[in-house]
Amino acid sequence: MLQLYSKPKTYLMKFAVITILLIAFSAGICQAQDHYLGTIEADSLLSGYTDFAVNYANYQPDSATVAWLAACKIDSIDIVLVLGTWCGDSKRNASALLKALDEACNALLQADCYGIAPGKQFPADIVQKYAISYVPTVIVYHKGQEVGRIVEHPAKSMEHDLMAILQPLK
C-alpha cells in the first residue's frame, strides 16, 4: 500500500516542479515583452507606460529654461534619447526631458526616442551606434556632430543640462 501512494507523490512533485518552472518561464517572457525595443514615439511611450506618464504629468520644468529652449533658433539640431522602459532613471529623467521639450514647443528641438533591453545589449545597432553604457542617454548633435550628452542623471535638470549643451552653439 505504501508503494502505491509513493509513486503518485513522486509524479505530483514532478508535476509541481514543472508547473512552477513553466510559470516562472512564462513570467520571464511576459516581462521581456514589457520592454519596448527600437524606435518609439514619445506619445506611444507616454500612453503605453504608466510610470512614464505619471512622471511626465508630475514634472514641473523650470519656466525660465523652457522659455530659453522655446526661443532657441539653432538649425540642424538632432536630439537622440535612448532609454529603457524597465529603468527607473529612464522613467524619471526621460519623462522630464520630454515634458520640457513639449512645453518649449520648439519644432527645432525634438527628440528621437529608442528603447533598449536590460543589459543594454539589444537592439545591438542602437547600442553600438550611440555607444550606450547607461540609460537614459541623451545625445545632442549639431550638423551631424555630437556636441554633448546627458548620461543617466543630469547635473542640474534635464532641461537645464540641454540648455547648457546648446548655449555655446548660439
Image (cartoon, grey):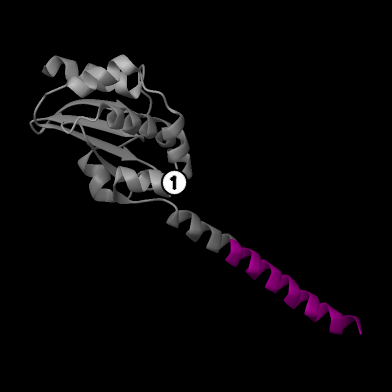
Q: Is residue 167 left or right of residue 91?
A: left
Q: Is residue 94 left or right of residue 164?
A: right
Q: Residue at (28%, 21%) from the top-left corner?
A: 66
Q: How crowded is mark 1: few (under 14 residues within 10 Å), some or many (20 or more)?
A: some
Quarter-of-image position of residue 82: top left
Query: Label 1 amino acid?
Result: Tyr
129, above or below 150, in the image: below
Q: Residue at (34%, 51%) from the top-left corner?
A: 37
- Residue 146 is situated, as x and y percent measured from the top left of the image, at 15, 29
Task: Identify the image quadrant of the C terminus.
Answer: top left
- Residue 122 is situated, as x and y percent measured from the top left of the image, at 32, 50
Question: On the image, numbered disc 1 is attached to which residue?
Answer: 49
Q: In this view, does 170 lie to the left or right of 154?
A: left
Task: Identify the image quadrant of the N terminus.
Answer: bottom right
Name the magenta segment's main secondary structure.
helix
Q: Is residue 59 left or right of residue 165?
A: right
- Residue 38 is situated, as x and y percent measured from the top left of the image, at 29, 50
20, above or below 73, in the image: below
In this orientation, does residue 119 appear?
A: no
- Between residues 58 and 83, which one lies in front from this camera angle? 58
122, above or below 162, in the image: below
Q: Residue at (41%, 23%) from the top-left corner?
A: 60
Badge 1 element: loop
In this orientation, does residue 15 appear?
A: yes
Reply yes or no: does residue 110 show up in magenta: no
- Between residues 155 and 111, which one lies in front from this camera angle? 111
- Residue 94 is situated, as x and y percent measured from the top left of the image, at 36, 34
Quarter-of-image position of residue 157: top left
Residue pushed farthest right? Answer: 1
Q: Give the range drawn in magenta.
A: 1-23
Q: Residue at (83%, 78%) from the top-left corner?
A: 6
- Between residues 170 and 148, which one lies in front from this camera angle? 170
